[in-house]
Image (cartoon, rainbow, N blue to C red):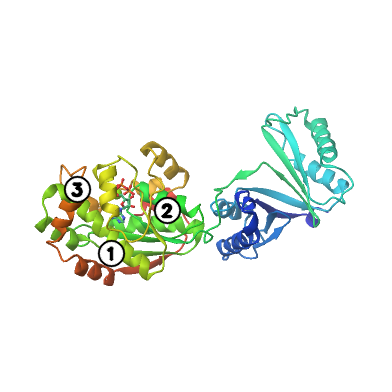
Amino acid sequence: MDSDRKDVIVVHYNEIALKLGHRPMFESRLVENIRRRLEDMPGAKVRTMQGRMLVRPGEADTDEVVRRLVVVPGIANVIAAREVDISIEALEEEIDRLLETWSPRGTFRVAVKRSEKRFRMTSPEVGGALGARIVAATGAPVNLKNADEVVHVEITQEGIYVGLNKIPACGGLPVSTGGRVLLLLSGGIDSPVAGLRMMRRGCRIDGLHFHSVPYLNRTSQEKARVLASILARGQGPTKVSMVAFGDIQSAIVAAVPRPLRVVLYRRMMMRIASSIARRDRLAALVTGESLGQVASQTLPNLSVIEDAATLPVLRPLVGMEKREITDYARRYDTFAVSIVPDEDCCTLFIPKHPATAAKLDEVIEAESLLDVTAMVQGAVAAREVETIGADWSAAPEELAAAI
Ligand code: ATP
Ligand code: MG
């Protein structure tokens, strides 16, 4: 009998459900995204079913499938479950099987959802019957409000799914429901978090990394690649443009007084990014800037920097403290890679006392000494484009150690 029951993963989403008018579009996008994230897993299949999605792992390892699902934007949580026939006897049998290897660590409850109204018992009746069975076997106390562990039972037209405890996933909206954006991706802590946060708002991310090879080594590029491979876990193969920035920086150093240089570097980044984004039909730029974090991120400087962009500049971290950003970086698995020491282009030619309130007219006057248009065109024409896929073979700490 045991072989009749199958492993399934029940996938829940919530925010999508709020987008009433667009619900079918959001659902089909999420199903498609899940399908692609599991593409290389033999036999894994996904489909929608009455307000949830059902993933069958096929020959793939259930834990490995779960590991992939929890980083797919749009998924709120998953339950590793078993599918049983639509009868109370089959349910009771499954609970007995569960009890062979499990008893509640503390309090527990049985949470029943019934979208198949032809099932002859109500949800409270099913919960009561199964709860009583677990109490009889283990003596564990029931707590309906705040249980330590939850046995989930979902009764649908096609089967009943029984699983222990929800596994939280990243939430948000499915990638590609919110447009495509260009992330200015340094090797630091902030920008990958900014990208992941926009990804969870439904944006598809392309990356742009400025490096200073041959003035500095290739470490920052390698970090950007590994960080892109972590973004790719959530959204699939990720396009990254590598742009050499060293010559532009040295031209600025040769022509512009020290305090203004940082703002000029960053305005050049904005111009190059805007040009690339327009070519690639991306709708906005994304940075990891946070107000007051460094000299270039004061309100007056952000405004002078943004003046050089020709697309909206999204700054999802603008109101966050470093500590909060770092917590996210750990949670999203980018931290270990971001803290690998590198020689970022921002460490090249950085003056000790950059202006904290650059004036736009002074900046524009300083820029008049440079052939800005030619510099931007040259940098864009020389960009190297790479497509970076998800790397599931190693933990982020191992990926970091290999840089
Ligand atoms: P991060 O931790 O993301 O490097 P940061 O606190 O070091 O950020 P800055 O160096 O001032 O801040 O950079 C602010 C933002 O500018 C970054 O979050 C990133 O979006 C962009 N940026 C900085 N350096 C680069 C680079 N080398 N390539 C691409 N984008 C960059
Ligand atoms: Mg940086």
Please state the horizontal and vertical placement of residue 133, each as a whole percent of the image: 83, 35
Report if the beta carbon of the residue with label 2 is closer than 8 angstroms to ligand 1: no
Question: How many residues crowd around disc 2 within 10 Å: few (fewer than 14), some, or many (20 or more)?
Answer: many
Asked if one can make out residue 218 in the rendered structure from this viewpoint, the answer is no
Label 1 and label 2: CA atoms lie apart by: 18 Å
Report if the beta carbon of the residue with label 1 is closer than 8 angstroms to ligand 1: yes
Question: The residue under label 1 is which amino acid type?
Answer: Val
Question: The residue under label 3 is which amino acid type?
Answer: Lys
Say whether residue 249 is left or right of residue 22: left
**In the figure, residue 39 lies in which quadrant?**
bottom right
- Reading the image, the residue beneath label 3 is 359
Label 3 and label 2: CA atoms lie apart by: 29 Å
Q: What element carries label 3?
A: loop
- Reading the image, the residue beneath label 1 is 243
Q: Residue at x 32, y 59 (%)?
A: 209
Please state the horizontal and vertical placement of residue 44, each as a whole percent of the image: 64, 62
Say whether residue 51 is left or right of residue 389: right
